[in-house]
Image (tube, rainbow, N blue to C red):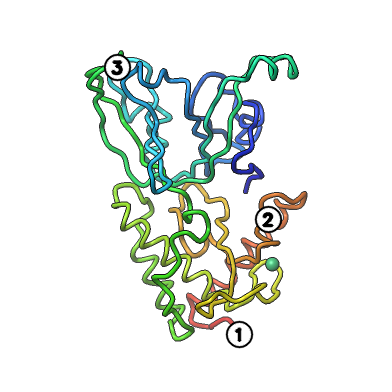
Amino acid sequence: MHEFIVGQEYVRQRLLDFVGSRQMQSGVLWGSKESGCLICTSGGRGGKKAGYSDELLTDGSWWYFGQGMAGDQSLLNAANAKLSSGKLSVLFFTTREPTAREVAARGGYGKLFAFRGDFNVVGFEQFVPSDGNRKGDRLWRFRLVPVGGGDDHWVGDEHTNADSHVDLQDLQRSIYVDSPGSEVGVSLQEYRRRSAAVHLYATLRANGRCEGCGMLAPFVRPDGRAFLEVHHMTRLADDGPDLPANVAALCPNCHRRAHYSIDRIEFGCALRAHVAFLEERIATGQGLK
Ligand SMILES: [Zn+2]
């Protein structure tokens, strides 16, 4: 659970405080306060001059380059090892230098970090720049895919025929069987298929009511399904991303509350407990009533 707002800029100290880290230089930050997540910052690597740079793709995913300033990069490097594990969610930020006016106003030169959203690492590959000052070095780049594709992006039309006849227990089982602890190495298509299945599952489990406040969804979609947003609760380091126990279907108010409210920690704990209770009932065939 975090309160970063997409598009808003933050100073580095905010990022360090969030994860509980004192790493001053590194592009990838982690700490004991949020052990299920990594902060990845993009920028400041010299871009074209180095022969490679992080890249936003048209589908909203990123190629994010590993750490290692010279020579071949290693997956044994602490940051690269964490990225390649696929077990941590990524809060992704892009970096910029402050303008002269901002430096004057803030009294400091610190870079600014714009939040780009929550991501999962779904794969990685080697990349060898053909020019620039890293020419010939074997680098690693990681594919970062938006969690849930922005809540709704991927769920869309392929499930418009979904109805209440789907057996939740069967669906729950199939999702767990389908998901080895880590998502790394699966194709993007496969990742999205699973992600869509979990979204569908969460909205069916909610059965038209917000899993946060219990109120009816605020409106109905054109296809007849209730409108609820799928919220990803912070994952534990040893849980795979996008599993039924990690998501809650929420009304827009509760979804915002989970991220931005003063009681978001308590709200998140209550939500997690409620979802765990529902999951247990479904797993043991007791149903939701
Ligand atoms: Zn609600």
Q: Horizontal placement of 183 versus 40: left or right?
A: left
Image quadrant for the C terminus? bottom right
Q: Position of residue 72 (x, y in %)?
A: 28, 20
Mark 1 CB lies closer than 8 A to ligand 1? no
Mark 2 surroundings: few (<14), some (14-19) or many (≥20) residues within 10 A? some
- Please name whichever residue, 43 or 83, is drawn nearer the observer in this view of the structure: 43
Mark 3 surroundings: few (<14), some (14-19) or many (≥20) residues within 10 A? some
Q: Position of residue 73 (x, y in %)?
A: 31, 24
Q: Is residue 172 above or below residue 179?
A: below
User: Mark 2 belongs to which amino acid?
Assistant: Arg
Q: CA distance from mark 3 to mark 2?
A: 43 Å
Q: On the image, numbered disc 2 is attached to which residue?
A: 256
User: Which one is earlier in the sequence, the residue at label 3 or at label 1?
Assistant: 3
Q: Is residue 39 above or below residue 150?
A: above
User: Which one is earlier in the sequence, the residue at label 2 or at label 1?
Assistant: 2
SS of the residue under disc 1: loop
Q: On the image, numbered disc 3 is attached to which residue?
A: 134
User: Mark 3 belongs to which amino acid?
Assistant: Arg
Q: Is residue 165 above or below residue 56?
A: below
Identify the image quadrant of residue 141: top left
User: Mark 1 belongs to which amino acid?
Assistant: Lys
Mark 1 surroundings: few (<14), some (14-19) or many (≥20) residues within 10 A? few
The residue at the point 52 percent across, 46 percent down is 118
